[in-house]
Image: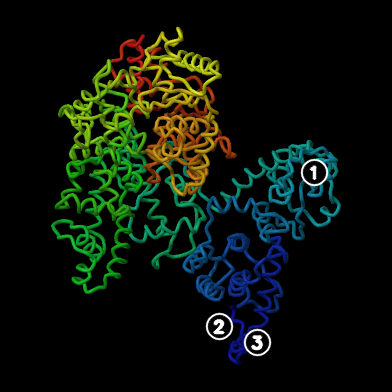
Amino acid sequence: MLSEVNNLSFKLSNFNKDNMRVMENNWEQIKLGFISSSELLKEFGFDHKALIHDVAILPIVYFVYHKYCVNLDLDKAKIKIDSNDIQLMKRWLIESLLKKGIWSSNLESLLLHIRKAIGKTATVFPYEAVKQAMLEKDKALSFNEEDVQNLCQLRYGKDNEIKALLLLVFPDSQLVRTHIDHIYPKSIFTPKKMQKLKIVNDGSNKLQNLANTVVNLQLIPESVNIQKNATQPAQWLESFFMGNLSSQQLYLTSQLIDQIPQDLNQFEWFCQQRREKICTKLRNLLDVKPVNNSVFDYPELGALKLSKARFSSDQIKFLDKLGVWLNVENESIDLKFMMNVVMHHAFNTKVNSQPADSIKASIIMQLLDVTNAFDKTKDLLPQAYQSGYFMIDDASNLTSFEMDDFINRDLEAFLNHAEERSVTIIKARCGIDGVVGQTLEQVGQSLDLTRERIRQVEKNAFQNLRERVRISVDVIWENLNQNADSEFMQLYPKLASHFSNQNDLLNFLELLCSFDKNELVHIIKPNINVNSLLQEWFLHHKAPMPWDTAIHQIVDLAGCTERVAKNAIHNAAENADILFSDQTKTPGIYPKNLNKMYAVVHAALHFKDGANFKEILERANQEGYSKVELSTHRLDHSINEDVEENYLYQSDRGAYCHINEFNISFADQELIFKEVLAILSQQTQQQSMHLRMEAYEVSDTLKQYDYFKIRHLIRNWGVEHGIYFTGKSGADTISLNEAVKPQSQLQTILNWLEQSSRPLTRDDIAKKIRSGSQNHASLYLNELMQAGSVVRVAALEYTTPQKAYKNVDIHKLHQDIVAYLKSVNKPVDIGIIAEKVNLKYHYNYPKAWYLHLVKTSSKDLEAQNIHTFHNLISLDETIHGVTIHQMIRDNFKQLDDLDGIHRFINQQILVGKTEVYNAMNNIRNNAAVI
């Protein structure tokens, strides 16, 4: 090093004649340089513990040798080093020892570069020149806030840099031989000693760890440390300064101590107070800029994630590596993180041959410039989104036209500036700007590349484009689900202008967002069987079905958005599966192409007082309810099915009525069953009897009711009460037998669901239960769902909770739901949760699935409890008793302003408009009945 040898490796070839002759001729000066530098280290307060890298002394020896020793008269055995040089060398040495990674690798190259920076003729130790030389070798001697915090975490006995740190923070040239002393003896923080001294112990090692950090350490002379031993600090101060309060206070100030608490339970407070002072001093000594708090003035800006739409390729690569370098999730890198962590972090590496710190600085400057240019008197988020520097990851206030504008601008920027081959491939694959869409093979032929190579380039090109689009994939997906319909090209006109047809545009968006093939097509033309989802409503309600009710029904059962439900309805109308009442935006809906059983039931709704089966069948044909023409010449078996299922009841010989007109109260039904059982029990001489002749005609209780209603009641529900009915040969016969208890049926259904390899439908269940009734199956399934034993996983499918959530991260979903409830800070209808989570994870689960998840996860997980009341969920247990119906009844006499009522309700409960509409209808209907 001192002899100007170009190769500093410690190897035999370096000990040649020429090199040895140089050393021999200058040996006395060299020896003096080493001895003087060693004495200088003692003056700094260094010993073998502080000098953790011996090689670090060489630049100091080199400077001392050339400035003070080369031309020295050897008769003068001692040299005097300038105080300014001493301070600069001490500062450089301590900083180089404290900065991680400086002396860990590439030492020969680093020392040569430092030697060149110092030179032979330096008149003052060139601190800044040496720092620059180190930076050029990716050994930046700069500190940031993260370094300051890490230095304050250094621990005695574990981190070798601890004494160098103390020498930096507490310099004292008089303390040549110093020891590291624990201000509060570490021995008092053992479990037994803490118990003896009545120090509160939470069972962790927190106090033991604190006792060994810099906040509890000081440098004192060796002899004093031996005398102090394990004395408590207050007692030692009193003894050492012999009651001289002025001297005590001067010492405490020099050690950055406000006061020494005598209560040992205040030790942690003492550490916190001293840590703040040490951090402040370190920032001053190491030239660490204070944390930039400007972003904190605007929390909405600080939380924004960075978009790569406006950054260069080097900057994008830097941002891609940040998470790995700093060991953080990419989702955590927002504007606040960039300004408060990244800005003050030194990156000792390169990106594309460029110093990472330089790229970092360019990014920070761009972010500062763009945010400082915002008009702080206006809404900041739209300005941030317009700038292109920030991701749009909230779709709540983003219209289809805004999304169209943003994606179009980012696409055009990419087409103008991206690598030519990538642009060519994307244009050809998606039919952009007049280029005819081509297959992978066709593109490969035109570019003389293999199909697989084109696929790889295409993948990378779309990844590159995706990084430059400021709207997140989740927001694009949610926006399309909320807005896309058959007029897709008109909704996104700017983007559409690059494509000749809708299919090319959809294909482009699917490739851009890595969606599955035809996933966007299924938004516009959903694979939803509208008839199967609406037919249950038509079993009990006369057409037309209100538009909002249909939307709500499909959203609830299919787990889709309202837009997708509307698209499904329009597709069903185009396929003549339903019929619109008019051409308005919200027409009523008439059923078409129903199964015969459903068609007959709906036709029966036209006859309030019942009708002959021929009239019912003719009406079904006349309205076109059925998929097939119904024969009116004989009793169709579908009518018997409807009676079995409790949708119709026989009102006379050959006549039938809708079950809606079956107006016997539940209490009266129980009375009828009790009466029939009593009559059957009295007839001990015979096993069966005629319902009409031997029961109905002899009972004044039964004769209060229409016979055919009693007949239907016994026929369909008698088995649940132990009454068995048969109507063969026109004779209505009843008898007693051992009852099949409902509970055994419930357990049987559960067993089927547990054993089945797939979810079962209501019809599957109906075929297995004793009665064979779909209605009974529905009742059993509802009872099991209320008990939490069964979960509806799709529109018409059921299974057990274990199978329903088998491949789902329940804990993650629970966290998502809790986070959303915290953000809105009010009760939320479960339908809102279902829509948001379905969109986020591309699920199609119904509301019932989420409600069951919320109830069970709140019980089973060690997580924040979510309270439920009907379909509302909240983090506040006072939700119980809150209903949409009651809020409407209490606040509105007129129910003619849906939008106004919905706005009012949403001030207190977050709920969809359809739920409010249905609640208003229920209130109207109940008022009409009363």
* Displayed quadrant of residue 115: bottom right
Per the image, the residue denoted by label 3 is: 24
Residue at 54%, 25% in the rendered image: 877
- Side (left or right) of 471 relative to 63: left
Q: Which mark is residue 233?
A: 1
Quarter holding residue 927: top left
Q: CA distance from mark 1 to mark 2?
A: 53 Å
Residue topped by disc 2: 5
Separation of disc 3 and disc 2 at Cα? 14 Å
Q: Can residue 902 be seen in this snapshot?
A: no
Q: Is residue 522 left or right of residue 496?
A: right
Q: Foreground: 376 or 134?
A: 376
Where does residue 454 sit, x and y in percent of width and height? Answer: 27, 68
For mark 2, give the secondary structure: loop
Above or below 648: residue 209: below
Nearest to N terminus: mark 3 or mark 1: 3
Chain-order first, disc 1 or disc 2:
2
Element on which disc 3 rests: helix
Circle 3 Cα neighbour tier, 10 Å, few/some/many (<14 / 14–19 / ≥20): few
How much space separates mark 3 and mark 1, taking CA atoms?
54 Å
Is mark 1 in CB contact (under 8 Å) with mark 2? no
Taking 17 as reference, is 614 above or below it?
A: above
| Sequence-first tag of 3 and 2 | 2
Q: Position of residue 208 (x, y in %)?
A: 74, 48
Identified by mark 1, the residue type is Pro
